[in-house]
Image: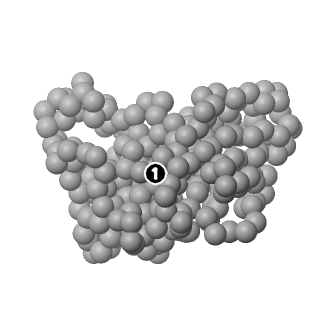
Amino acid sequence: AQKITQTQPGMFVQEKEAVTLDCTYDTSDPSYGLFWYKQPSSGEMIFLIYQGSYDQQNATEGRYSLNFQKARKSANLVISASQLGDSAMYFCAMRGPLHGSGNTGKLIFGQGTTLQVKP
Amino acid sequence: DAGVTQSPTHLIKTRGQQVTLRCSPKSGHDTVSWYQQALGQGPQFIFQYYEEEERQRGNFPDRFSGHQFPNYSSELNVNALLLGDSALYLCASSLGGGVNQPQHFGDGTRLSIL
């Protein structure tokens, strides 16, 4: 069965510094996608970055980058130059292949990491 | 470009009642998934609709049912509400459901059961 583990319930970072949020995953499928979402206190889930299992390079989107280590089954999110507006809950999620394994694309989420940016 | 919209924003019900939540997908998306998020937890997959049919279901009882309309919008129905159904219900839309297609979420409906 697929599983996502986020071991950091809460993190603090000083404004303008970089921070790494950990995510490990477990799957036996060769094809999968890894996603990071941000959820502010207002509740909406905001898509940040995607990494495919066959992608050779780590994904980057502005200040967000994904440190993908396939052999270790980890997909850590790195936020550079933290801003006060980055304070939120961050979720790592996995989606499996559309066919073959019976998974039709549902997302499996970790427990989340609460990030607080200090001024 | 309209994103995913959900209604209502907040809802208060009592035990035993029934509720219907609504979702309009992002323009161009044809697949709608529903998730339940308890306080302090990650979202849990309820079910997914594509071409007006339930394509996959998570570990939720039959009290949870849904529907997708020809315009791709969707409804989530919950019967015989329990206190434990209190949660944020998130709707997400995507195109086709491929592995590399991100799901885009609405703002959610906060359901409180008294």
Residue A16, percent from left and from top = 86, 38
**Residue depicted at x 26% and y 64%:** B54
Q: Is residue B90 above or below residue B2?
A: above
Horizontal arrangement in the rendering, residue A80 relative to residue A100 (left or right): right
Residue B2 at least partly seen: no
Residue A47, percent from left and from top = 59, 55
Residue B43, percent from left and from top = 44, 43
Among all residues in the image, which is located at the extreme top?
A: B114
Horizontal arrangement in the rendering, residue A61 relative to residue B89 (left or right): right
- In-front residue for pair B22/B89: B89
Amino acid at pointer 1:
Gln
**Residue depicted at x 57% and y 43%:** A91
Q: State which quarter of the image contains the C terminus of chain A.
A: top right
- In-front residue for pair B13/A62: A62
**Residue depicted at x 70% and y 55%:** A68
Q: Is residue A9 above or below residue B93?
A: above
Horizontal arrangement in the rendering, residue B6 relative to residue A42 (left or right): left
Q: Circle 1: is it few (<14), some (14-19), or many (20+) Cα within 10 Å? A: some
Q: How is the image coloured?
A: one colour
Give the total number of marks visible in the rendering.
Answer: 1
Q: What secondary structure is marked by label 1?
A: loop
Residue A82 at least partly seen: yes
Reading the image, the residue beneath label 1 is A2
Chain under numbered label 1:
A
- In-front residue for pair A45/B3: A45
**Residue depicted at x 41% and y 51%:** A1
Horizontal arrangement in the rendering, residue B84 relative to residue B5 (left or right): left
